[in-house]
Image (cartoon, coloured by chain):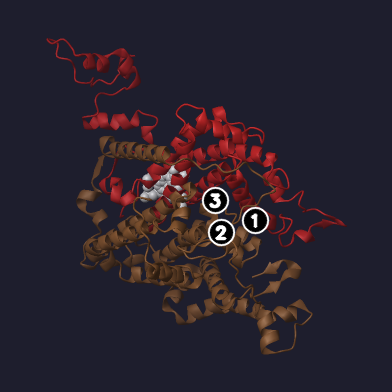
Amino acid sequence: MAEVKTPESPKAPDPGKKPSLLEMVWTGQIWTSIFRHGMPDTPRNRILAIMSNVFLHLHPPKIRKSGIRMKYTWCMGGLTFFLFLVETVTGVMLMFYYRPTAEFAYADIISLREDIPLGIMREIHRWGAHAMVITVWLHMMRVFLTGSYKPPREFNWNVGVILLVLTLLLSFTGYLLPWDQLAMWAVTVGTNMARATPFVGHEGPGAAMLKLGDISLVHAGSDVRFTLLGGRFVAPAALLRFYVLHCVAFPLAAATLMAVHFWRVRKDGGISGPM
Amino acid sequence: MNLLAITLPKFYTDAVNVVVGSAWIFMILSTVILWLGLKYYRQLTAPKVAIPIFAVSGILLMLSFFDPQFNRVATLPDNVPIVMMVGSVGFFVWLAFRQMAVNDERIEKGLPPQEAEAKEAEKTFVWPDLVYIELICAVLFTAFLILWSISLKAPLEQPANPAKTPNPSKAPWYFLGLQEMLVYFDPWIAGVVLPSMIITGLMMLPYIDKNPKGNGYYTFKERKFAISVFMFGFIVTWVLLIFMGTFLRGPNWNFFGPYEPWDIHKLEPLTNINVSEVVYLHIFNTGMPRNWFVREIWGILAVLGFFVITPGILVRFVPMFRSFYQQLGMIRFSILIVHLLVMGGMVIKMLLRWIFNLKYIVAIPEYFFNI
Ligand code: HEM
């Protein structure tokens, strides 16, 4: 199996000299079992550094200079992704303490602030979420203003649009979880609109036409808003639904689409540049 | 803040309250400013012009914090991101248009855009050139988030209480533009049709914008129409409506100036009137007809005219639209024009409401159809 090791071992130690501790780590079995390349200071190793790492290989090994300029991409897509990771990590931490029931939710949020060490996780999560909404918009604006939605990137733009919607939905579902006045009424205002969805909302145009004889099919207890909230009002059932959407369904969907998005950035020829 | 109690001069706050606090002046003024900005983007983005503009806006913003009303709203923890958003959108719009100005000048001289220069087209190693940029961005942003989180507590109000409706009840800030639409349109339009059309418009965009130029570099000159429409949609009808929903909409969803205290008892006379009422009560003096179709025919004609005749006029008399029609074909052109007209119609409807108190152009409550 000696073939698997990269032949170019990092800075082969001078046989006459005692190797330094750092050199022992770099050339030791543990390090070389993880990183199958030497110090990334030669072209070959730099390429291997990207290609042999499952996370970094989202990037191509080499890239157009204009594409990595901060003034070109503003690093906005990257920041959006970074914020998604921040939200995932802090969100998992919040889940340890938070119970999505009307009985506990509010009190758990208070104890997040009062009783728990490192009590800024909720703040990081909330401000990170707001920041992510802003960075997605700015990223979209950058992509638009550089014309990067034009062929061959039409499809990836569309993946982006869905990611944008998911980002807003993630933010919106999370807004309810503190179960305070701000949360309840913002979500009430937001979901009230669903009442009026044509045909499937009970106050929407066309809903009255969906009847079986005298029985109307779409009413306050069966329309889309009811489905969304699990009830006629923003009540405990809505809290549970929003919690599951916020912590499981939407993050999974967003993560999946991000994988597609990044993969397509590469497949569509990398960051856009003049043809 | 108390150490440095500055009172803004009254003539200044009054002037701002009149200009910004009157919805139609605010809307028309921002559109005109956007139009001027797009027209003179080369001069305006030059650092020696842009830096003073940013400095003055920054100072005005800081001074605004000395006004008790502005301060109360702007420092609500959930509103801090809005101030940041407006600031960062301003900065990045400048950054983009600055590069457009530079590139457009180069293109005029027959040079390629900056991004196409030989040294820019060269390939470089992702490790370390890109990976380090990403790392530094991540570290700086983490530091920023931690500082933000230490200095500003996340809001928590009284426990949820279905019996106590706050006044005003606002949607989360990023949906305030849509909530604003509820004032002018039925919920099914404001809450369902318009947001859907924003999404479909964005999704169709790459298939409708057939202009091959400006792909992968900053340029305004080569894609004036697309960029102007996008900037109007994003800046005026999205970002500014959020600003409006946050700072200018107070109790009972009344309109206030940014420095005008939110008076719960402010009364706005409800004199909104439908087109049909104008026609039958004020022009014909006949009283309202019973039949809804007869009653609403004038509004229906106006709306049909807007959606059917405008495209015809545009294609017939505006060379740009004629060439769009020829390049895009019927289907793509229709999608383009419907989205454009809905966006324009939305703004026209808002202006009609603000200026003429027009309630609905077509009002058929019999069928939940009011526009
Ligand atoms: C959760 C949201 C999103 C994430 C994490 C994300 C991430 C990224 C990243 C990391 C890139 C690489 C280049 C860059 O950083 O600018 C990128 C490129 C791109 N994104 Fe996004 N994005 C998101 C949303 C969007 C949205 C909303 C759109 C458009 C509506 C969009 C359209 C594109 C396109 C077309 C590219 C290719 C650009 C080019 O080649 O220059 N993305 N995205």
Disc 2 residue type?
Answer: Leu
Q: Which residue is mark 2?
A: B178
Q: Are marks 2 and 1 in contact (CB under 8 Å)?
A: yes
Q: Which chain, by letter, is red?
A: A
Q: Which residue is mark 1?
A: A193
Disc 3 residue type?
Answer: Pro
- Residue nearest the observer in this picture, B211 or A21: A21
Q: Nearer the viewer, mark 3 or mark 2?
A: 3
Q: Under tag 2, what secondary structure?
A: helix
Q: Which residue is mark 3?
A: B172
**Residue A42 versus residue A163 in the image, above or below:** above
Q: Is residue A162 left or right of residue B89?
A: right
Q: Earlier in the sequence, mark 3 or mark 2?
A: 3
User: Residue at left 30%, top 70%?
Assistant: B40
Q: Quadrant of the C terminus of chain B?
A: bottom right
- Residue nearest the observer in this picture, B36 or B323: B36
Q: Under tag 1, what secondary structure?
A: helix
